[in-house]
Amino acid sequence: MSAPATRRRVPGLRRLLLILLALIVVGGLAVGAYFSPVLSARDVSVTGATNAPADEVAKVVEPLKGRPLLQITSAQRDSYAARVITVSPWIDRATVTVKYPSTLVVQVVEREVVAYAQRPAGIVLVDAKGVPFIKVGEPPILTPKLVVNDPKPDDPSTTASIAVLKSLPPDLHGQIVEIGADSPANVRFVLRDKRVVYWGDDSRAEAKTAALRMVLTRPGKEFTVINPDMPTTR
């Protein structure tokens, strides 16, 4: 009676030993990868840096080079990404990730320029969030001037003006040389031929666009589409 029982236990013991051996091998590989110089950061890849200096961005993560990728924690990557943002006012946000076997990837997202503003210190570019972020000698071609009392992200007139600007189709957007408001309900813009459009708030953009296309075919220098159901020309 004891021999068959012994034979039954032997295969079970063999399976247990194989499982333990497999776990030891996997654990050994994991430990090896964690400390292995083969999987260490040796290269840096910077993407998305057009106006920001890519070489300066790469220098930020230089201290991570030589470190095994598995030892670089997400908190450390976030910390270095925050430092990348300080490299240039053009950088809106950044991420640092790892790419095996040996690359640190720094992805930069630059600010989208939507307008410029004239300030006492000179011309500053304004991004899609309403942030005046960098002083320039001349604004980029076809960039409209933003005319509000105090351009900034939490200014309602700034927010409304940019919302209207971004809602316009490219052909109309490209005609605008100046856009502004003295309140979020009174957005107005000037076209390249000096005709003035009174838009109102940033609601009903599609209906206002259709109304504007219609009234622009008429003679006049001022066009009002605040109520797109009753556009006027003067």
Image: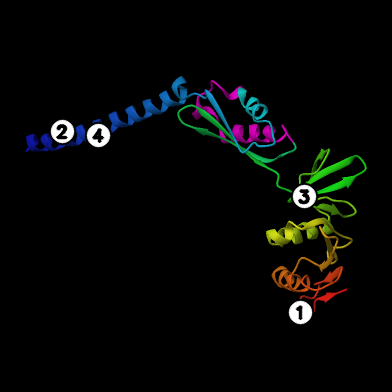
Give the labeled residue for mark 2. 10
- Disc 4 from disc 2: Cα separation: 10 Å
Q: Which amino acid does the dot numbered 3 rest on?
A: Thr
Callouts 2 and 1 close, C-beta under 8 Å: no
Using a 10 Å C-alpha cutoff, classify the residue at mark 2 as few (fewer than 14 neighbours), some (14 to 19) or many (20 or more): few
Q: Are marks 4 and 2 in contact (CB under 8 Å)?
A: no
Q: Which numbered circle lies on residue 9? A: none
> In which quadrant of the rendered view does residue 110 lie?
top right
Residue 72 locus on image (x, y percent)? 55, 29
Given this view, does label 4 or label 1 mark the residue nearer the observer?
1
From this view, report whether residue 173 is shown above or below residue 111: below
Point out the frontmost of discs 1 and 3: 3
Which of the two labelled residues, at mark 3 and mark 4, occupies the earlier sequence position? Answer: 4
- Residue that label 1 marks: 229
Give, as a three-letter code, the residue at label 2.
Answer: Val
Considering only order in the chain, which callout, 3 or 1, is on the residue closer to the N terminus? 3
Disc 2 element: helix
Query: Which residue is nearer to you in this view: 113 or 33?
Result: 113
Residue that badge 4 annotates: 16
Magenta segment includes 122: no
Q: Secondary structure at mark 4?
A: helix
Give the mark toward the camera: 3 or 4.
3
- Disc 2 versus disc 1: distance between alpha carbons? 88 Å
Mark 4 to mark 1 CA distance (whole Å)? 80 Å
